[in-house]
Amino acid sequence: MKKCELYRCLPNVKTLLEDVELQSCIEEYGRDTVKETIQCELGKLRAEISQWKDGQETENDLEIRMKEKLPHLTDMVKERMKEKQRPNIRPVINGTGTILHTNLGRAPINEEHFKKIASVVCGYSNMEYDLDAGRRGERYSHFEELLCKLTGAEAAMAVNNNAASVLLILSALAKGGETVISHGELIEIGGKFRIPDVLEQSGSVLTAVGTTNKTRLEDYERAITENTNMILKVHTSNYKIVGFTESVKIGELAPLAAKYSIPLVEDMGSGAFVDLERFGLSHEPTVQESIAGGADLVCFSGDKLLGGPQAGIIVGKIKYIEVLKRHPLTRALRIDKFTVAALELVLREYLSKEKAVKNIPTLRMIGKTDDETVKDAKKLCRMLKAANLSIQVSLRPCCSQVGGGSLPQETIPSMAVAIRPEQISVTKLEEQMHHCSIPMFGRIVNDEILLDVRTMNSKDFKLVVSQFSDIL
Ligand SMILES: *Cc1c(COP(=O)(O)O)cnc(C)c1O
């Protein structure tokens, strides 16, 4: 058959739409979507015919190839429809060992919490209704008292994320005047979020004091003028200057701020509630410490070390929180019911440190013991070996990281399963892992893929093995 005649062998769209095989598809996804998919699949076959050139194969071969494909056309359409229906955002398996992985959704939410959140968001709730008073309430009321109790602050609120907290605080309290900040704290947090830019955006003028490595109390005092509206401290959570350094603690700045009646604000970034020393990590300042030290306002992320939903939490003096709650930006940056519900649940866990460490996935992963990681790694190793795939599997000690710009220098000793493919390259294997139905992420080290079990759930091991079987 000639190339030009082959086009005529292709069924037309109308015939396919009437095909019994596709009727359930049409019912489920709608006629237009199915039609579009048919057109697309037929287009591919037409392109294949038109690209045929004399030489590589005979026209006869092309005909055979086409006739092999045609009976499967409806299956292909069905397959495409299924793919199209699959949500683009989906769960992945994190074997990178980075606990707060910004690209992989940062802090995971406890599943039990999520069930409770679902029951709130799937229907109506008392989101902004005060049941006791019988009138309109505040969305912050569900977690404000909890935050005050846990941090020792007078009042609290939350916005969309911590970048929003910083913007709101500066816009509401520092606009039209100067903000004093140490040179060493003019950081970029990531995603082009730079403290000097946020200051400019808020309408406050930056007065940088001290030097990159050393800033003293006198530096702050000398910079204060009648136009100073705020003293801002930013926790340099994502980098560390080591060696010849000096900075001024909140506790030392508080009397200075009080003397000149200027609000003292600390952006803590991660905002730990529990002391990480209990996990063998170095001390990360806690929110309680900052409030006790005399900060007027403290802001931090909901989905970093706190282990909750994305949010920017602000705690501190009632007179400042009142100003923030009334500011027009707050309406633009406000949190939704998902966040309100998730925040309340995660904060409740902190009423008992033991419960927090057990029930908040971020803390749970940071706190996994050597016994646990070794046991899990051995189990995954055994399961992969038993599947008899064309890979070499072994145990490797490795280092996990907290991530999310927290504790950049700290690593946590952990255990990984190392996978070395025998028939394909390690980069090819990694690419295939990313294209599984539940994509899998690891780290390539020395031509092996390391799957750090600290960030994995042993419940997923069966799935991991079956996906590797599919790839290989
Ligand atoms: C991460 C971080 C932010 C931004 O917080 P998001 O919740 O990611 O918006 C702001 N300041 C500091 C110091 C941070 O570490």
Image (spheres, grey):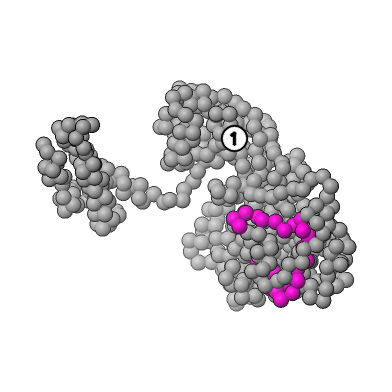
Q: Position of residue 400 (x, y in %)?
A: 65, 38
Location of ligand 1 given as a quarter of the image = bottom right
Q: Residue at x 15, y 40 (%)?
A: 3
Residue occupying the point 54% across, 57% down? 117
The reply, left or right, for residue 404 in relation to residue 1 is right
Q: Secondary structure at mark 1?
A: strand
Taking the image as shown, residue 373 lies to the left or right of residue 180, namely left
The answer to whether residue 75 is visible is: yes
Say which of 187 and 360 sits in front.
187
Q: Quadrant of residue 137?
A: bottom right
Taking the spot 58% from the left edge, 29% from the top edge, the residue there is 446
336 or 253, nearer to the observer: 253
Task: Please tell me whether residue 412 belongs to the stretch shown in magenta.
Answer: no
Region of the chain picked out in magenta, as a range: 165-192
Residue 18 visible in the current orientation: no
Q: Position of residue 416 (x, y in %)?
A: 60, 31
**Does the beta carbon at disc 1 come under 8 Å from ligand 1?**
no
Work out whether residue 308 or residue 253 is closer to the camera in this orientation and state it.
253
Task: Tell me the residue at 44%/28% (across/down).
Answer: 424
Farthest residue to the front: give it.
55
- Residue 169: image location, x then y, percent: 69, 68
Tell me if 215 is positioned left or right of 319 in this view: right
Magenta segment includes 188: yes
Residue count near mark 1 (Cα–Cα under 10 Å), binned few <14, some 14–19, many ≥20: many
- Image quadrant containing the N terminus: top left
**Image-quadrant location for residue 397:** top right
**Amino acid type, label 1:** Asp
Label 1: which residue? Answer: 452
Horizontal and vertical percent for residue 100? Answer: 62, 47
What is the quadrant of residue 374 in the picture? top right
